[in-house]
Amino acid sequence: MTRSRALTRRRVTLLVAGLAWAVALVVGGSYGLTALRIYQQTTRVAARFDPPVVAGQVIAGGCSGGFYARKDSTIVLLSSAHCLAPGDRIRDGQGRVVGVLGPRAQLPDCPATRFCAPSDFMPLALVPDRIPWGHLNMVD
């Protein structure tokens, strides 16, 4: 192999490596910006109360809290079932537990090998001291 051919191969290798790094940086930067956008403060549709009204707000991982409902004697906030897993604990900005996610909605006649969802709801059972009494519109 001649010297000029070796230099050409080296230049091609460096060019490919540089392009790979550029693609990796663009993908990493895009992922980082997406993560920042997901977790940034959103526009509130309700005034701030303590404990806060989280219906209609982002509760975790970009998922929105739906509306409050009563399941027997438990107050729940309906949430999107595709974002988190049953049993996950949701915490507020100070690290206090807001509630625990319950089971996903599932049809009773669903085969054991499948997941049959009639809706994309999952209840978030609220901790009693995190229920914004006096500021609820609820479905029973």
Image (tube, rainbow, N blue to C red):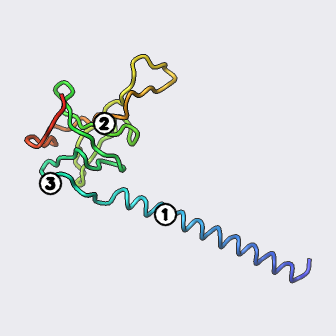
Image quadrant occupied by the C terminus: top left
User: Disc 2 residue type?
Assistant: Leu
Secondary structure type for disc 3: loop
Find residue 48 and report its image quarter. Answer: bottom left
Residue 101: give its label.
2
- Along the horizontal axis of the image, is 121 left or right of 112? left
Task: Give how far across and how far down residue 99 sits, in percent.
Answer: 24, 39
Task: Give how far across and how far down residue 65 sits, in percent.
Answer: 27, 43
Q: Compared to 31, does 73 lie above or below?
A: above
Q: Which residue is mark 1?
A: 30
Secondary structure type for disc 2: strand
Task: Give how far across and how far down residue 54 sits, in percent.
Answer: 22, 46
Task: Give how far across and how far down residue 6 sits, in percent.
Answer: 84, 78
Secondary structure type for disc 1: helix
Mark 2 neighbour class, 10 Å CA radius: few under 14, some 14 to 19, many 20 or more: many
Q: Which residue is mark 3?
A: 48
Residue at mark 3 to residue at mark 2: CA–CA distance: 23 Å
Mark 3 neighbour class, 10 Å CA radius: few under 14, some 14 to 19, many 20 or more: few
User: Disc 1 residue type?
Assistant: Ser
In percent of the image, x 31 and y 32: which residue is there? 102
In percent of the image, x 91 and y 80: which residue is there? 2
Q: How many marks?
A: 3
| For marks 3 and 2 on the same chain, the one whose residue lies earlier in the sequence | 3
